[in-house]
Image (tube, rainbow, N blue to C red):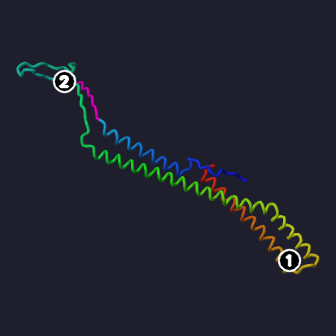
């Protein structure tokens, strides 16, 4: 029979992982919004060549052949002035993050409570299985053997034989139901605890 720890719940459970991933997404979105509050510095460089005639003074023409290069630089600084919308989005994301953290904690708490409940049920079912495996199935086998022998010797009627066999079948049926319940609890626990 399997043994499980009562205070054990992995963070690898798919539902917990989903909520943790949502928190990471919200944090990334919030960081993107925060960058919109920072000043923006832009540096540009332009390198061009021209072909054709060019006049500096409007009288004389100079022929540009494409090998003459003209350079220009650009430097700009953008300071966000109207940033209340960005601040509001950041605040909204903070609320979403708190909500997601509370949902994660709630789900973890529910999973822990569910696993604790299953562990309690598992102990009860294990006790029933121990009874059936220790005494119950032996009693069932003895009832069947005794009923068959008594019926063959003529000591009991068919109705009494049927009642004894029915009692033996009920004991075996109880064992099989307990075994099925045990297996279902183990499956649920392994899902919850990701074993």
Name the residue beneath numbered marker 2. Answer: 50
Q: Which mark is residue 31?
A: none
Q: Is residue 2 left or right of residue 114?
A: right
Q: Is residue 139 left or right of residue 79?
A: right
Vertical placement of residue 91 versus 126, above or below: above
Q: Closer to the camera: disc 1 or disc 2? A: 1
For marks 1 and 2, the one nearer the N-term is 2
Dominant SS in magenta: strand
Give residue 110's quadrant in the image: bottom right
Image position, residue 160 (x, y; %): 85, 79
| Residue at the image point whose x is 51% and y is 52% from the top | 105
Image position, residue 1 (x, y; %): 73, 54
Image position, residue 49 (x, y; %): 21, 23
Cβ–Cβ under 8 Å for marks 1 and 2: no
Viewer-nearest residue: 190 or 154: 190
Q: Is residue 91 left or right of residue 146?
A: left
Vertical placement of residue 9 versus 168, above or below: above
Tell me the crowding category of disc 1: few under 14, some 14 to 19, or many 20 or more residues within 10 angstroms, Cα based: many
How far is disc 1 from disc 2 in space, using C-alphas? 115 Å
Query: Is residue 4 part of the magenta span, yes or no?
Result: no
| Residue at the image point whose x is 49% and y is 47% from the top | 20
Tell me the element at label 1: helix
Image position, residue 181 (x, y; %): 68, 62
| Residue at the image point whose x is 31% and y is 45% from the top | 87
Name the residue beneath numbered marker 1. Answer: 161
Query: Is residue 44 part of the magenta span, yes or no?
Result: yes
Furthest residue in direction left, as rendered: 59
Tell me the crowding category of disc 2: few under 14, some 14 to 19, or many 20 or more residues within 10 angstroms, Cα based: some
The stretch of residues the image draws in magenta is: 39-49
Viewer-nearest residue: 145 or 2: 2
């Amino acid at each position: 029979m399997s043994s499980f720890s009562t205070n054990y719940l992995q963070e690898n459970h798919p539902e917990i992982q989903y909520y943790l991933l949502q928190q990471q997404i919200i944090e990334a979105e919030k960081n993107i919004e925060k960058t919109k509050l920072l000043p923006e510095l832009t540096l540009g460089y332009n390198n061009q060549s021209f072909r054709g005639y060019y006049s500096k003074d409007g009288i004389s023409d100079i022929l540009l052949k494409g090998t003459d290069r003209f350079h220009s630089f650009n430097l700009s600084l953008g300071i966000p002035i109207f940033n209340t919308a960005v601040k509001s989005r950041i605040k909204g994301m903070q609320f979403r993050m708190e909500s997601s953290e509370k949902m994660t904690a709630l789900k973890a708490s529910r999973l822990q409570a569910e696993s604790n409940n299953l562990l309690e049920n598992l102990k009860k079912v294990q006790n029933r299985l121990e009874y059936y495996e220790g005494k119950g199935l032996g009693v069932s086998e003895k009832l069947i053997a005794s009923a068959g022998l008594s019926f063959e010797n003529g000591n009991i009627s068919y109705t009494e034989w049927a009642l004894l066999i029915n009692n033996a079948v009920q004991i075996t049926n109880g064992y099989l139901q307990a075994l099925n319940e045990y297996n279902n609890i183990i499956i649920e626990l392994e899902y919850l605890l990701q074993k």
